[in-house]
Structure formats: structure tokens, C-alpha cells
Image (spheres, rainbow, N blue to C red):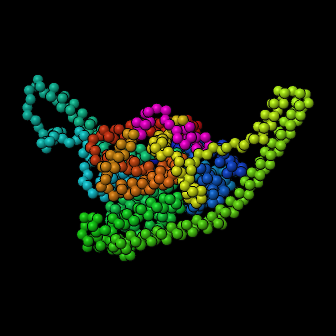
Amino acid sequence: MRITRSERPVALFALLLAITLQAVIIYRYNHIFTDPGPSYWAVFLHHFSVSGYDPITYSVVTDWTAKYNVFRHPLLAFFVAPLYAFNLALSALTGVNCVQYVVALFWIVATVYAFLFFYRIVLAILTGSDGSRFKVQSATRVQGSEGPSDGSNTFSTAPQAPLRSTRRGAFAAKRRKNCAQALLNCATGALLTAPQAQALLLSSLLFSFGHVLLAGMAPDHFILSMMMLLLLLLVSLEKLQQQRPFTIAEAIIFFIIIAGITLSNGVKVFICVLLVNWFTLSPTRNKRSSNEVETQTARVSTPLLNGRGRGVGLVFLSLLFASALLWTVARVEYKHLVLPQEKITHAKKAAEKKRKAEAAARRKAEAERTFQMQIAQAEAAADTALLAQAKHRLDSVRTAKPKARRNPYGRPIAKSGFMRWTDVTTPRGSAIVENLFGESIQLHADHALGDVLRHRPVIVAYRSPVQYVVEALLALLFLAGIWCGRRSRLLWLALSWAAFDMLLHLGLGFGLNEVYIMSCHWIFVIPLALAYLLRAVRGKWLSIALAALTLYLYIWNLSIIFQVMT
């Protein structure tokens, strides 16, 4: 967790970006949320609108309750409980609700460390220390620095043969010009192809994606999940490098924290720990002899994990036990903390619904009496036009139906349990183009930062074909990066996480109507694959193209965010 001297410029860039994002959202809602009153949840819910992200964290930090869905976020309310205590103390000192500032402080730290974790991962890839099973070209050789093929030194200072005075000046000028050009090319190439610069470029690319920026700004749990997933990926990289398996304690700690924030991400902990232990505990999966592997395993891990079958099996059983424990905690939490509040809320909603129904019935009865009186008057006056109009209005009142509410959800597989969040009717092709690889990376100018539960359509198209060209280019680079890193265990580990998310969102349709807000759970695999492409392709032109793409995404996404939020 310590930031080294060489990482300080990277951390400074991430810090400035995180502070900017939090400053935007504080500026937008500070005048409302510093004094929300006793009905603070209604105030947060009514005013906060950022692409479907929930202000639940603001509510929990203002007045602690288990307000998150405990079956999807079992321990998240307990993880943010210290923020509630901190906000309570600040509010007592200042007299206002400091929830935005308290949450912003924690979110800034999470954003900075997520940036740093990803930077360390891609730096290891670019320097060839990620455990890939193929030879890596040196990243230090850049254009302009190769020198002649015969081994001579271009910049040699050895004495030259005497030249005629008439040619000496021209030759020296030409030589100085060539040297300056070579040094310029060398410096430019080194700047663009140095592993540290490329790692910073790819990390910046990740945080230029639209909903990574919004996750670092909105008070929802996604940036926390991303930080922990990247930490797990970084630890997995170190395990693969050192041929060390996850211990039972490490596996359970990661599972409790990551699944406690978002339960579905607990599956990724299963995948990660089991694959890493399979690779590190298998003598046939590395270049070392069986005796050497067994000696090192016994030295660096618990004896219980000696042997692939035993090590993977014991960790798997331990994670199953942790899953059962976490589910039990969620059930107890629901029974004692959530259910009593739900009963009160349901009673209030039922009473409010009954009051509205009675008021609507009274209005309908009064309207019927009014039109019946008009009918009687028209019949008495023998006014056929007024009689027909009054009868038509009376029929309209009697046959009127309640206005149908807009339903942004598709048809679920089932209407109970977890299956009620699925979707089998939303078109997958449009969702992939416009939402999964569209809105997640490039925000739409139409219905900008809109919420599908309010007014935003599920599918929104871009105004210009330029955005589709950028999307296609990034997809092609992503596929090329997968091919270049096809021998890397780390890449396939990350891709297995993304595959699980695709099964969840595209297969079952979980959250498909707003799939972009969950992009932090998987979208880091795109720049991760690009790291393998950068490592395989020599030259600076790919780095220049990625730098231009990153700059474009920052300009496009931040301009939309600033336009809507300020």
C-alpha cells in the first residue's frame, strides 16, 4: 500500500483527477445535502440523479441503517459505518451535514489506490514480469537508439581522419544536425515507449472511460469494488511471480471483503484463488523440478496446502464455508435490521396508497354528480348539444383507467428471488453496442447522465458515427491485445472475470437495462489486454494512437459531465 518515490507523479495525477470529480458532485448538490432535514432519504432520492447511481451511501453515512440490499451487498453498510461516526462528529462541530465531504474523502482514497493498483499491474506486464510464457522484447530499445547494424558507435568521439578545410565545416554542421536529430528521436521514443510512461498511459485510458469517471464521482459502491478487484489481481500477479499459493486465511479475507461489498464478485474470488493455487501448486505447470517446487511450497506456505489437489480442495472448502457464513450474516441482518424497517415502510406505503385511492374515488364521484346534474339540466332545457357533451364526459369519467407507469425493465425469468432482476426481452445486440461498449466508455450526448428509472430510454444512439468508429477501434485493439497475451495466465484470469460478468448481464440479463453502471467490475480488462499489445508491438506509433484516444475520451466525457453537473 506504500507509494514509492517513482509512483508519486502517478499518484499525483490520480489525486488531481479524483479531487476534480468529487469537487464537481459537491458543487452540484452541496446547497441541498448539507441541510436535508429529517426526511433526508426523500431529499437525496428526489434530487440526486447521475446515470442511475444510487445515493444510498449518503443516507447511510447521514443516519446509519442497513439500507443497502443485504443480499447483494451484505457487509457494505458495516464497512461505511466508520464514515457515519466521522460524519456525526463533524456535524456536531459544524452544525451542518458533512456527508458529501466525508464520502468524498474516502472515495478519493479509493480512486487513487485503484489507479495505482492498475498501474502496478500493467507495469509488471510491460516489463515482462507477469509470468507470461513467452519471450518479451526489451522495452528499453526505442526508435532512434538501435545504432548501425555493424556494431559501430554512431556517437563515437574517436579522432577522425583529417579533412580538407573546404569540406570540414560542412561535414561538422551535417554531423551536428544528424546527432541532434538522433537524440531527439531517441528522447521522443524513450518517452513514449518507456514502461513507466506506457503504464501511466494505460491507467489514464482506464480512468478516461465514461463510467469509470462517474464511479469515481458518484457515492455508489462501484469504485470500492474496482479497487478491491484490482488489489486481488495485483496480489494474484505477485503469487504467480513467486510461485506462492493463496493461503486459506488470505482467501477468506479477500472473499469476505469483496463479496461483502458486492456478493456476485465473490465468484471472482473463487475463480482467482482456485486458478492461482492450481498454477502455483502444480509441478507440471512451471519450469522447475518437482523437488524444487515441493521445497519452495513447504517453505512459503502452510503444510496443509502441499500438493495441488489438497491445496485447491482445502481452499475451495474454506471459501464454501465463508460463503455460507456470509449468507447467514445476510439473513440475520435482514431479519433484525431490514425486515422491521420494511414492515414500517410497507405499512406507510399501503396507507398512502389507500389514501390516494380514496381521494381518487371521491374525485370520480364528484365528477359523476356534476355531469349528471348537467345531463338533467340539458334534458330540462331540451339542449341536445349540451346533453350529448355531458353524456360523453360522464362516460369518460366512468371508463377512465389509471395511467400506466413506465416500465424500464424487461421481462424477468421469474418474479421472485434473484431471478426477478433478470431480463430476457431487452435486445442484446443494441445493448452491447450502445450500452456495454458504448455508454460505459463514451457517454451519450442525448439524455446525458440520465436515469432509466426516470426518463432515459434503455437504448440511446449516438448522434455521430465518430463514436461508433472509436468503439470499433477500441474493440479491435482489445482483440489484438488478447491474441498477444494469449499465453499469459494473468490475462486469462482477468478475462474469466469478464466472462462471468458477461454471463450475468448478457446471458441472464441481470441489470441489462443499465449495464454501464456496473462496468467497473470488468472494464479494466480492456487496457489490461492493450498492455500485452504494447509489449508485443515495437515503436511509438501505437503509444501515440492510445495517447490520442485517451485525450479524446477525457475531453468527450468530462465535457458532458461538466455540462450536466455545473
Expressed as whole percent of the image width and height from the top left, the position of residue 60 reads: 63, 56
Dividing the picture into quarters, in which one does residue 457 lie?
top right
**In the image, residue 450 lies in the stretch drawn in magenta:** yes
Instruction: Please count the marks in the image.
Output: 0
Q: Is residue 142 left or right of residue 25?
A: left
- Magenta stretch secondary structure, dominant: loop
Give the camera-side residue of 23 and 420.
Answer: 420
Residue 200 can be seen in this image = no
For the point 25% across and 49% down, the residue is 138
Give the camera-side residue of 10 and 411.
Answer: 411
Furthest-right residue in this view: 380
Expressed as whole percent of the image width and height from the top left, the position of residue 356 reads: 77, 48
For the point 31% across and 49% down, the residue is 483
Q: In this view, does 331 lie to the left or right of 162?
A: right
Up-down relation of residue 128 to residue 290 (above or below): above
**In the image, residue 118 lies in the stretch drawn in magenta:** no
**In the image, which residues are magenta?**
447-471
Expressed as whole percent of the image width and height from the top left, the position of residue 399 reads: 75, 41
Q: In this view, does 553 lie to the left or right of 538?
A: right
For the point 36% across and 51% down, the residue is 122
For the point 78% across and 34% down, the residue is 392
Indicate the quadrant containing the N terminus: top left, top right, bottom left or bottom right: bottom left
Indicate the quadrant containing the C terminus: top left, top right, bottom left or bottom right: top right
